[in-house]
Amino acid sequence: MPLETGRTSDDHLLWVANPFTGVVTYLTDIHRKRTGFHRSNGEAPTPSVDLTTLRAHCPFCPGNEELTTQEFLRRPDDTGSSWLIRAFHNLFPRIPSECTGGKNESYVLVETPDHFRQDATSPDHLVYSAMLPPDHFREMIRAAAELSSVPFANPSVEAVVIRKNQGRESGASQPHPHTQVIGSNRPFAPVARELEVLRSDPGIFRQLVELADREGFTVDRRNGCSLYFSPIGMFPRSYEVVDLETDGRLDEIPRDRLDTFADLLRQGLAILGDTPIDYEIHADRGIPLHAHIHARHFPYSNIAGTLNLPMGLLRSRNA
Ligand SMILES: [Zn+2]
Ligand SMILES: [Zn+2]
């Protein structure tokens, strides 16, 4: 197969597909993003980094709505005067708009109006996703799934993924809890690969769930949905949430299935707490609804695609 590349109308290189893995590299302006993270060196905040000032400058904090792009979704709070969840265009599309019919199909969903924990005394004391109450977390996942219908309305969009980066080390540029919803003109390579494997082995996800059961890796199961430690993750602390009974695009998943899925996803995130993590939700017709959760704590232990896991990794937790 020839090397696949894409170019802009003025002949600049736009993307290259890895001929071995299918993973696409896009040439974008993401590197121009300014990081919003502040470090306190563990000491009390100095007047120049007091939390009120940091909130005032955060584009994702309530009151700063004019600092973001056009709003696409808003869940009001109890008072009706402010919001619990809000979504808008990502300033720098994750996939160049030239690839998706000239439209930016990358969205940011702000998960909560809170930026710092209630007892925060330092810029490091950030709210993280697993701190959201279960109802709020469910509503956030519902909102992300609902938002996916916006890129899907674009005829040049073929796939949508929900992606979360938590922590600067995981690639997040803003400390305020947020999630991305990204539309692409081509299938995402890992999902395409999963579909390909499913065609030759339709029971592969069931086998993974059963392996987790047998090895004591299962953390919880509800209504046919499983949360388990994944021995085949990218890094040594990976979890997966798999709903064997549900498939379909993100905007097609029935609410009760999505809620159970969200509960188990939140439970998986709670295991990792505020450590740098990412997760992705993969959903498509013909594939069980699932999420991959990765802790970015030990990134250097992934060498050339290999992984070393300690024997009896979960022994202490299951004891
Ligand atoms: Zn904020
Ligand atoms: Zn997947």
Image (tube, rainbow, N blue to C red):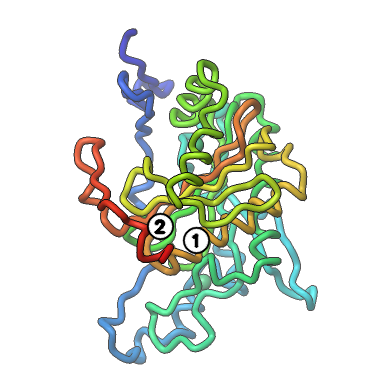
Q: Give the secondary structure at mark 2.
A: strand
Q: Is residue 32 above or below residue 149?
A: below
Q: Is residue 114 above or below residue 197?
A: below
**Type of amino acid under label 2:** Ile
Label 2 or label 1, whichever lies nearer to me, is: 1
Q: Quadrant of residue 130?
A: bottom right
Left or right of 186? Residue 246 is right
Which label is found at residue 277? 2
Disc 1 CB within 8 Å of nearest ligand 2 atom:
no
Q: Is residue 68 above or below residue 112?
A: above
Q: Residue at x 51, y 33 (%)?
A: 207
Query: How far apart in space, not on screen, are marks 2 and 1 (Cα)?
Result: 8 Å
Q: Is residue 47 visible?
A: yes
Mark 2 / mark 1, whichever is N-terminal = 1
Q: Are dots 2 and 1 in contact, CB under 8 Å? A: yes
Residue 260, x across and y down, in percent: 68, 53
Q: Quadrant of the N terminus?
A: top left
Farthest-out residue, top: 1
**Residue marked by disc 1:** 269
